[in-house]
């Protein structure tokens, strides 16, 4: 990417992060005769597909944050192994904690900002502790995979780490979106 293309890329990313269009906007669901055409609002169409309330956008944002966290993780891992001569498994534990802090902060400020601002949301320290516990507990599965790929198959530890982190990215999003930053259910009382 050239330097002059960066503002366009950032504009595109910002556009992807915008909330869904308001309910008043109506778009045809399929092209057919007027009598048979179904009209649906964008947010209703998203809910029908199971990704309502901006979940698809949050998923994409979470993936981008995950890539940033992966870069932090890989940099710390490479530094500890190459420069400090640490064992790659111990370095993976430390690099995981470094990327956990980084990704939590970005997720808090960008991906789940609205959920974090909700008055009924979990307290910030609780969200961090649960997020850290999720990432730390995933090490119980990631470390054996990292060991098997690196020591068992002879794959470079950085490539093995990349594979291990990516394998668990979707699982972490499901837990983060559905539990850590879950918005409290609103009661719909009828009067």
Image (tube, helix red, strand yellow):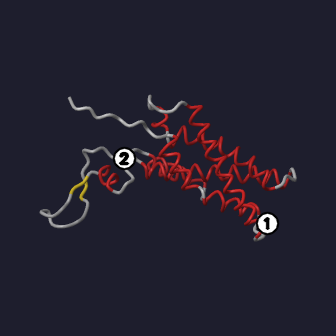
- For mark 1, give the secondary structure: helix
Q: Residues within 10 Å of mark 1 (few under 14, many from 20)?
A: few
Front-lying residue, 189 or 63 = 189
Q: Quadrant of residue 128?
A: top right
* Callout 2: SS: loop
Tell whether label 1 touches label 2 (CB within 8 Å).
no
Identified at 42% across, 45% down, the residue is 18
On the image, the x and y values in percent for residue 98 come to 70, 44
- The location of residue 113, given as percent across then percent down, is 49, 37
The residue that label 1 is drawn on is 151
> On the rendered structure, is 60 left or right of 92?
left
Q: Position of residue 11 (x, y in %)?
A: 48, 49
Residue 61 at x, y = what percent?
A: 51, 49
Tag of residue 20: 2
Seen at 58% across and 49% down, the residue is 65
Discs 2/1, front: 1
Furthest residue toward left = 35
Numbered disc total? 2
**What is the crowding at mark 2: few (fewer than 14 residues within 10 Å), some, or many (at least 20)?**
some
- 3D distance between C-alphas at marks 2 and 1: 46 Å
Seen from the viewer's position, the closer of residues 71 and 4 is: 71
Q: Which of marks 2 and 1 is nearer the N terminus?
A: 2
What is the quadrant of the C terminus in the image? top left
Looking at the rendered image, the quarter that the N terminus falls into is bottom right
């Amino acid at each position: 990417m050239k330097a002059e293309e960066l503002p366009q890329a950032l504009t595109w990313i910002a556009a992807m992060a915008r909330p869904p269009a308001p309910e008043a906007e109506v778009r045809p669901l399929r092209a057919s005769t007027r009598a048979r055409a179904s009209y649906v609002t964008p947010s209703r169409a998203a809910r029908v597909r199971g990704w309502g309330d901006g979940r698809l956008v949050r998923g994409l944002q979470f993936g981008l944050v995950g890539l940033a966290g992966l870069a932090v993780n890989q940099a710390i891992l490479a530094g500890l192994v190459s420069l400090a001569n640490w064992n790659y498994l111990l370095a993976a534990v430390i690099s995981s904690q470094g990327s956990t802090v980084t990704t939590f902060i970005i997720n808090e400020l960008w991906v789940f900002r609205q959920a974090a601002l909700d008055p009924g949301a979990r307290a910030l320290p609780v969200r961090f502790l649960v997020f850290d516990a999720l990432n730390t507990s995933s090490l119980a599965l990631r470390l054996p995979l990292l060991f098997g790929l690196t020591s068992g198959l002879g794959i470079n530890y950085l490539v093995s780490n990349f594979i291990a982190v990516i394998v668990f990215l979707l699982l972490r999003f499901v837990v983060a979106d559905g539990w850590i930053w879950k918005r409290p259910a609103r009661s719909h009382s009828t009067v």
